[in-house]
Image (cartoon, rainbow, N blue to C red):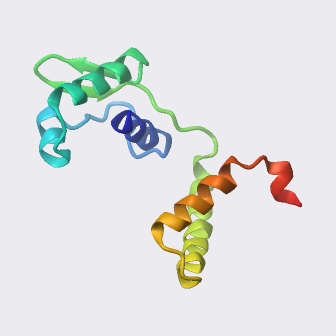
Amino acid sequence: MQLIQQVRQAMRLGLLTEGDQLPTVKDVVAKVAINPNTVLKAYRELEYEGLVAARPGVGTFVTRTLTDASLPAHGPLRKELRAWLAKARAAGLDAESIQALFATTFQTPIEETAS
């Protein structure tokens, strides 16, 4: 699931676009040290979703993108988020505390965060 989420996230952020080749199963296994069958299963799921296509003997390629009209807003928002992260670290929060704070805030309905 993590591999699928990472590929989808890269597609959503415009880091992977139509025509890009995914790393080979062998490369992923070498870098992440996971079972080759796990990588194959993830690639098959992405193919089933219509996001990639396997070309025998050539590789696996992105067939569509997940980016949308919000992509231009990512840069300024990323800059603001980096500033917020710097404030959180300056306040003494470690990575796990920052993740917990973000996750719980993210899951809170917007109406509750406005008050």
Residue 50, image quadrant: top left
Q: Residue furthest right?
A: 115
Specify the quadrant of the image occupied by residue 11.
Answer: top left
55 horizontally vs 44: left or right: left
71 or 31: nearer the viewer? 31
Q: Is residue 4 left or right of residue 55?
A: right
**Figure disc tally:** 0
Against 85, is 72 above or below?
A: above
Quick check: 26 left or right of 85?
left
In percent of width and height, residue 26 lies at: 11, 35
Q: Residue 14's x, y, as percent?
A: 45, 44
Q: Quadrant of the C terminus?
A: bottom right
**Foreground: 2 or 82?**
2
- Residue 28 versus residue 83 in the image, above or below: above
Please give the name of the residue rendered at 55% of the width and 72% of the height, measured from the top-left corner.
85
Residue 69 spot, x, y in % from top left: 63, 41
Q: Residue at x 58, y 47 (%)?
A: 71
**Residue drawn at (62%, 69%), measured in percent from left and top?**
80
Which quadrant of the figure contains the N terminus?
Answer: top left
36 or 53: nearer the viewer = 36
Q: Where is residue 73 in the image (x, y as percent from the top left)?
A: 63, 54
Q: What residue do we see at 74% from left, 49% from top? A: 108
Using the rendered view, name the quadrant where residue 59 is placed: top left
